[in-house]
DNA sequence: CAAACAGCTGGGAGCGCTCCCAGCTGTACG
DNA sequence: CGTACAGCTGGGAGCGCTCCCAGCTGTTTG
């Protein structure tokens, strides 16, 4: 086995009988190279398995081809949530497709954040950053705003400055659609098991619920709105609290809570959906497996991650742009728990 | 606001009245700099917020300071599993602590793998790679073996060449400990709800179960071993299948299956742990919340991730080393379902 | 038939670091 | 008082690429 000389543009050029510059043009898919020359170079590249040195490329071109995905400390605890793994998957997939690499910043301690934020905000390592939104005021957003680093927030903060770019799922209309579906099915006393109010998606879903009722001339009854804490037990308790007020349908702000709701109803001797209809939100696996199968609102998380990358790359490559703010539509998944299929 | 000149070693040197080289020494914590000079340079670095350009550094030093974490296609589906999020967290944490960055490769399609593997194996982008082991023969391992890239497998393949470095949790001894604990409590007809046999951890846990029995003079009864498919329903069904053979304890190879087992026992009118003891494996959240709380085997996943990085960095920095293979101990978590606390 | 120009190719300069060696100090020692 | 040597500092060279401009073809046009 011969000791291969280190592969560089120069070396490939020598092998193909052209200059460094021409090889560079071929490798980067630039025009202005004669077809036969291009082919000859490509052949050498293929045979040698040459991959240009990314460090040299970064240094010379002043761009690294790496995007950062930042999961702040306040979110990292939920990283096990299928939502995040799915989102991360969408983001990574889109990165590769667009020729970028992905660097993950999963923060766990404050020290880590302090140590790494300056490096992240530094233009020289990353070309752009996607930040997962958090509930509280994270130091990362102002840090990034101070820098020239292109960045995008996924999901929304409670207080979102309007000069930020973000993309999110439209929780309001998702919830509204779900409730309107229940209304169409003839339900009138529709209860809502909400999430923690300091949580933006929870708040938005509640708004969507209220909007659907108002627009359909149904009065909002505060007795029919109970906080279920985003947990199954919370959903169970919430349903118990709701029963005295005789709802004919319950819209839960998450599938997890909806599962608790269904269990509570069963335990109270009620049939779902015959006696009472139930809808969830998220479309998690347990929702599909539960008995009855849960009707719910699906977030297109994977596509959402892909879009995030596309928007960010647009910002990077098109330079200074006005903040881009986009909301992605949800999808109503009709299964058995809402009674539409009776 | 003044238009700051781009910060470079040279520029910082000018501000501190020293040369590029001296600034480099200070920034890299090398000795051979007089204390007062060092302090003066540090002051400028702090005030300007200077961070050395990683691309230039990589190019000159021939190392990038980036580690890759590869989640092959065959594993990516399980990325939502708390196991992975925890592992990823441990790995990222350790990276930062050791001054490395982390790049994530979460594969989803074959095309992605083909496209990126050559770049991953290329020394110039990553200093080292951690690969999550998969059940089937992934192209990535041979690819990395062909290259000079230092890498480490986390978990084990079914067929693990002994010239590979890997680290894993010791599933055999974890399971053995759990079963021995049940034996000490006086149980004799101990059943096992196993996972899929093509799954290495599942196989190892079964081996540990059998070992514990053999070493304690208890015959292995194949009627007492049932595959629970790593799912709750599978656990439920497995327990039903076991009941005719009158086990006095059931060791499930995962908490998820254990939860199913407990539900089946309850539905059969049996009390846990009074009538029958149950142990799980993993120590997931549901295990802690179930009724009764599940005794289980905990994997120190976070520490495990940290160790993975340490071992890898050792390989990188110490150069050519013999393959390092390490097993990490599990921890027995005694709660209520095994009856030790009666 | 000369001039202009598009199409292609080569090489210089420079990106911001690290590494190495030369040189410059000051102290220890013969 | 000269020599040796450690302790510190500065600058050259070079990492492998991109960008840009110069130059060399061959074709088109006045």
Image (cartoon, coloured by chain):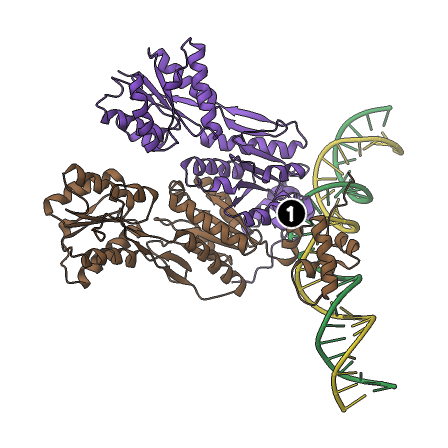
Chain colours: A purple, B brown, C yellow, D green
Left or right: A20, with B291 as reference point: right
Query: Is residue A332 among what the camera can see?
Result: yes
The residue indicated by pointer 1 is A57
On screen, residue A307 above or below A28: above
Q: Residue B324: x percent and y percent?
A: 42, 63
- Tag 1: Cα neighbours inside 10 Å, few (<14), some, or many (≥20)? some
Q: Residue A292: x percent and y percent?
A: 26, 25
Q: On the image, which quarter does residue A5 sit in?
A: bottom right
- Helix, strand or loop under label 1: helix
| Residue nearest the viewer, comparing A83 with B338 | B338
On screen, residue A98 above or below B142: above
Q: Quadrant of the N terminus of chain B?
A: top right
| Residue nearest the viewer, comparing A275 with A286 | A275
Which residue is at 36% across, 54% downward?
Answer: B156
Q: Residue A62: x percent and y percent?
A: 68, 44
Q: On the image, which quarter does residue A338 sit in?
A: top left
Left or right: D3, with A138 as reference point: right
Which residue is at 44% across, 23% downward?
Answer: A205
Q: How many marks?
A: 1
């Amino acid at each position: 086995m011969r000791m291969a000389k280190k592969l560089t543009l120069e070396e490939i050029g020598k092998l193909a009988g052209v200059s460094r510059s021409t090889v560079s043009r071929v490798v980067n898919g630039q025009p202005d190279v004669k077809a036969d020359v291009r082919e000859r170079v490509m052949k050498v590249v293929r045979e040698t398995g040459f991959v240009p040195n990314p460090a040299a490329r970064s240094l010379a071109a002043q761009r690294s081809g790496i995007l950062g995905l930042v999961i702040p400390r306040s979110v990292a605890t939920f990283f096990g949530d299928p939502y995040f793994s799915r989102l991360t998957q969408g983001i990574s997939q889109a990165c590769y497709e667009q020729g970028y690499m992905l660097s993950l910043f999963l923060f766990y301690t404050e020290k880590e954040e302090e140590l790494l934020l300056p490096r992240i905000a530094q233009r020289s390592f990353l070309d752009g950053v996607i930040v997962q939104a958090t509930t509280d005021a994270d130091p990362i957003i102002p840090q990034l705003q101070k820098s020239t680093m292109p960045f995008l927030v996924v999901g929304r903060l409670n207080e979102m400055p309007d000069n930020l770019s973000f993309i999110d799922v439209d929780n309001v209309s998702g919830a509204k659609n779900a409730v309107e579906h229940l209304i169409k099915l003839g339900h009138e006393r529709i209860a809502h098991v909400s999430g923690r109010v300091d949580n933006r998606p929870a708040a938005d879903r509640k708004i969507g619920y209220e909007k659907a009722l108002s627009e359909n001339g149904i009065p909002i009854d505060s007795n029919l709105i109970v906080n279920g804490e985003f947990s199954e037990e919370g959903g169970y308790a919430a349903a118990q609290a709701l029963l005295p007020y005789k709802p004919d349908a319950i819209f839960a702000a998450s599938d997890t809570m909806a599962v608790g709701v269904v269990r509570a109803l069963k335990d109270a001797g009620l049939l779902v959906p015959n006696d009472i209809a139930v809808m969830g939100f998220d479309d998690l696996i347990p929702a599909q497996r539960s008995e009855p199968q849960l009707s719910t609102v699906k977030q297109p998380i994977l596509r959402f991650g892909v879009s995030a990358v596309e928007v960010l790359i647009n910002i990077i490559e098109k330079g200074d742009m006005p903040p881009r703010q986009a909301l992605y539509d949800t999808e109503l998944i009709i299964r058995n728990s809402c009674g539409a299929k009776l």
